[in-house]
Image: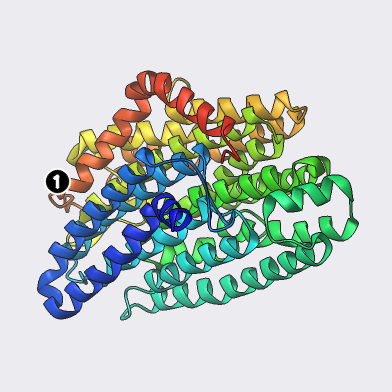
Amino acid sequence: MTDLSSALQLAAPEITLAVGGLVLLMVGAFGGEKSTRLVSGLSVLLLLVATALTVTGPLGQAFNGTYIADPMAVYGKAVIFLSAAVAIVLGDVWMHRNNIAKFEYPVLITLASVGMGMMASSGDLISLYIGIEMHSLALYVLAAYRRDSLTASEAGLKYFVLGALSSGLLLYGASLIYGFAGSMKFDEIAAFASATPSVGLIFGLVFLIAGLAFKVSAAPFHMWTPDVYQGAPTPVVALFATAPKVAAMVLIARVLVDGFNLAHDQWAQVVILISLISFAVGSFGGLLQKDIQRLLAYSSIINIGYALLGVAAGTELGIQAMLMFMTLYVIDQFGFFAILLSLSRGGRPIRNIGDLAGLKQDRPLTAIALTVLALSAVGIPPLSGFWGKFFVFGAAADAGYWMAGAAGLVASVVAAFYYLRIIKTMWFDAPASDIATDKAPAVPQYVGWLAAAFSFPIVIVALTWLEPLTKAAAAGVGVG
């Protein structure tokens, strides 16, 4: 009973979200559409409670080592749950404004957060798979949230079909690893890999990495990303671009560092290759895009390539760099999407880059905020995007992968073109019509401004506490 009590205490964040999500589902079912605001508010409160339980809870292992609560899991879940809460807030405002608000939206995000929390705390291949599928099923539904939209339905279908393919790759890799290592647990796999190196084990790991790369939309497993980003509702895409990517990156770091650290030379080659392909696809693929959300899809691909450089280093410094990069990346992404959610003209959302023409006249503060975020994405110092790249490039160079870091710098220069095109359109192009932008809803507008303010100058102060936090999270991998 003591062991069970301890296990339940360790898993309290996920249990709270799971039970709370089911209760909110009943509230919405019996309360109808009138309860949407209530369910959204309670979902945000539930995620904040889960965050508090995460950061104040004990460290250790539960359920025979299948669940790990170490500093990296704590840090990752705090970012995940807070990101999910922001996505609910942004989505509630936008969906009420567009008359498509339903109580299922916050409930699905809450239940997806359970799976993302499990991903961050996975201690074996079974909990890894359960966490991935638990959050993926909710995301498939969210992608097709607008049932009356053909593009949204197409996005949901493509995401589901390609997600099933990635799950097949992941399961095949997991079965090979289990067949050769004789265990599902990461620590026991690590012990076997160190004592008995096996080509079959590495072969299974490659398939496992391919399945996980799909979840973070790393090239060449990115094929779902542009279409889903373009077709799904904007607040849903804001969620896709943030919390699930953090969960998957923490999971990738845990699998490779905890389970296969002694085979670093083998898997690092695969991760570096994926990173380099992501640089090429993300930078050149975005050059011809006109739809802003589709453009941000290619931006996400190249940024995941940067984060993978930190993982490829296979060091404590590399894991810290990845966590730092993902944290700063998430804040920038919420800024981009919040501004998109606040912009409309004549009752129609602004989606094309050309629609931003003349924004400096109608919304000068928003134009300034979007400029700061775009420059941050380019990596201009001393904005937050620069610091994220500074950490991952430094970790890659420290591990001897300075050529991969140089390739990342080249990709940044190429990608700068489409970010600068946004700035040029806002500040120098004449508007195509005389219709002014609509009055912005307060919440997304303030979120966008706050994210831009964080990119500069708040980030300078924030780094003084983010750096020790990420360092402690990276140093504590495998505690318990």
Question: Picture quarter containing residue 21?
Answer: bottom left
- The residue lying at 58 percent from left, 60 percent from top is 128
Quarter holding the N terminus? Answer: bottom left
Residue 112 visible in image = yes
Q: Residues within 10 Å of mark 1 (few under 14, many from 20)?
A: few
Q: Amino acid at mark 1?
A: Ala
- The residue lying at 65 percent from left, 27 percent from top is 395
Task: Work out whether residue 411 or residue 125 is closer to the camera in this orientation and state it.
Answer: 125
Task: State left or right for residue 48 relative to residue 352.
Answer: left
All told, the count of numbered labels is 1
Task: State left or right for residue 59 relative to residue 203.
Answer: left
Quarter holding the C terminus? Answer: top right
Which element is circle 1 on?
helix
Task: Work out whether residue 131 or residue 402 is closer to the camera in this orientation and state it.
Answer: 131
Is the image coloured rainbow, by chain, by secondary structure, or in one colour? rainbow
- The residue lying at 74 percent from left, 62 percent from top is 207
Q: Residue furthest left?
A: 34
Q: Which residue is mark 1?
A: 442
Task: Work out whether residue 342 or residue 400 is closer to the camera in this orientation and state it.
Answer: 400
Above or below, 121 relative to 265: below
Above or below, 464 relative to 447: above
Above or below, 97 relative to 458: below
Q: Residue furthest front?
A: 1
Residue 317: percent from left, percent from top = 63, 27
